Amino acid sequence: KNEVKLKRQVGLIGGISLIVGTIIGSGIFISPKGVFQNAGSVGAGLLIWFACGLLSTFGALCYAELGTMIPKSGGEFPILLEAFGPIPAYLFAWTAAVILKPSSLCLLSLTFAKYALTPAYGNCDSVPELSTKFVAASLILLVVFINCFSVKLSTKVVTFFGVGKILSLVIIIIAGIVRLCQGYTENFQNSFEGPTPGIREITMAFYQGLWAFDGWNQLNYVVEELKNPYKTLPRALIASLFIVTGLYLLTNVSYFTVLSLDNLLQSPAVASSFGSVVLGFMVWIIPLSVAASVFGTCIGSCFTAGRISYAAAREGHFNQVLAMIHVQRYTPAPAVVLNGLIALLMVIPNDFDSLVNYYSFATWAFYFATSITVLYFRYKMPDRHRPVKVPIFVPIIFSASALCLVVAPIVDNPEIQYLVAVLTMLFGLVFYFPFVHFKVKSQTIRK
C-alpha cells in the first residue's frame, strides 16, 4: 500500500520565498510609525529596527538547530513535545490554532482589504467597515482554497508575490537613495534628539518592529516537506533574514529622505505619504503594492498554519479529522479549513489593536519556551546529533530577550488583555484532560 503523507516539494528557493514572502507583509508599511513613536527619535528608531533584525536572526538560528535535530513539521509543537511533554505542546497547538494563526490571517486580511479599497475611497480611513469585512472574508476563502488545492501552487503564488513585494521596497529604496544624493539629509541631523523612552515604550517599539519581522520561523512548520531539510532549513533561514533586515533598514532610511519624524508620526499610512511626494499622481501604486504584498503573506501564513493542527492531530492531541491529508493533492485540507473558519469569525468584531496585542504577547511567550529548549537539549542530550549547532550565546540572548518582551509590559503597565491571553491559553486544558489525557473519543469520528 502507498502511504499517504506530505511530500518533499519545497526547495531552497521555495523556502526563502516562503519566509521572505511571509515576513514582508504590511509591517514595513505601517509599523514604522509605532516604532519611531515609542523610540522618540530617528536614530533610536533605526537602532531598534536593526536590533529587531538581529534578534529575529538569533531566533532563526535557534530554530535551525532545533528543526534539524527534530525534523518534524508543526513548528514549536514537536519541539515542546519532546522537551517538556504533552501539556506544554498541547497548549501551544491550542493557542496557535485558536489565537495565533487565525488572528494573524485575520489581521493580514483586514489590512489587505483596507489597502486594496484605498484607491476607490481616497485614503484608508475612508473605507467603509462593511466593505473591509466583506473583502477580508473573501480573501480568507480564496487563500484557504489555494492552500487546499496544491502545495506547488501555494509556493508559486508566494514566490511570485515575494518578488513583487521586494520590487516594491526596491522602488522605495532607489527613490530614497536618489533623494540622499540630492542632499535631502536634514532629517538625519541630530538624529538622537528627542524624549528618552522608558521600559514600556522600548518594549512597545520592539513589539511593533518584531511584528514586521514575524514569520522567520515559518519553515519549521513544513520541515517534512523540505527537500534535504538539513541543508535547506538553515540556509533558507539565514538568507531570508539577511535579505529582509537589509531591505527594512534601507526602506526606513528612505522614508526619512521625504518625511520628518513629525510628518511620519502624523501619517495614517507611512508608505502612502512617501509615495504622494515621490510618485505624485501615481501614488495609487503604493496601496495596491501593499495589498499585493499582504496577499502573498496571507498565502504563506495559511500554508504553515494547517501544519500545526495536522501535527497535533497526528500525535492524538487534536481530533483525528485534522490529521487527514487529501489523497490526491497531499495537502492537510481539514486543518487548513479550520484555520480559515476561525479567522472568518475574528473578522466580525474588526478589533485590530486587540488582535495585535494578543498575538504579540502569546507569540513571544512560546518563542521563549521554545528557545530555552536549545539549552535544555544541550544539557540533557549533549551527544545527540545536531546538523546545525549555534554558539551558546545565541539561545541565551534570544531567550532572555523573549522573556523581557513577555514580562516587561506586564510589570510596567498591567492590562486586562494580558490576563485574557493567559486565560485563553490555559482554557485549552479543559479539552486536554478529557480528550487527550483520558482519550475520550467520538464514536462517530472513529467509524
Image (cartoon, rainbow, N blue to C red):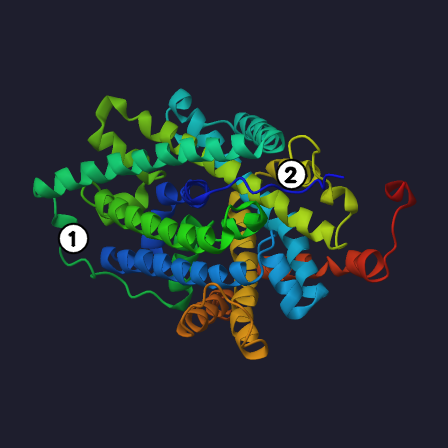
| Label 2 secondary element | helix
Label 2: how many residues lie within 10 Å, few (<14), some (14-19) or many (20+)?
A: many
Q: Quadrant location of the N terminus?
A: top right
Q: Nearer the viewer, residue 296 or 187?
A: 296
- Compared to 280, does 55 lie above or below? below
Q: Is any atom of residue 396 visible in this view?
A: yes
Mark 1 highlights which residue? Answer: 188
Percent across and percent down for residue 259 are 22, 42
- Amino acid under disc 2: Val
- The x, y position of residue 411, in whole percent, is 51, 71
How far apart are labels 1 and 2 at the CA level? 46 Å
Q: Could you tell whether 275 is left or right of 373 in the image?
A: left
Q: Quadrant of residue 366?
A: bottom right
Which residue is located at x 29 percent, y 66 percent?
196
Residue closest to the eye, 314 or 93? 314
Amino acid type shown at disc 1: Phe
Which residue does the numbered mark 2 point to in the structure image? 336
Nearer the N terminus, badge 1 or badge 2? 1
Q: Name the residue rendered at 38%, 43% in the picture.
A: 30
- How many C-alpha atoms fall within 10 Å of the one at disc 1: few (<14), some, or many (≥20)? some
Looking at the image, residue 284 sits to the left or right of residue 302; the answer is left
State which quarter of the image contains the C terminus: top right
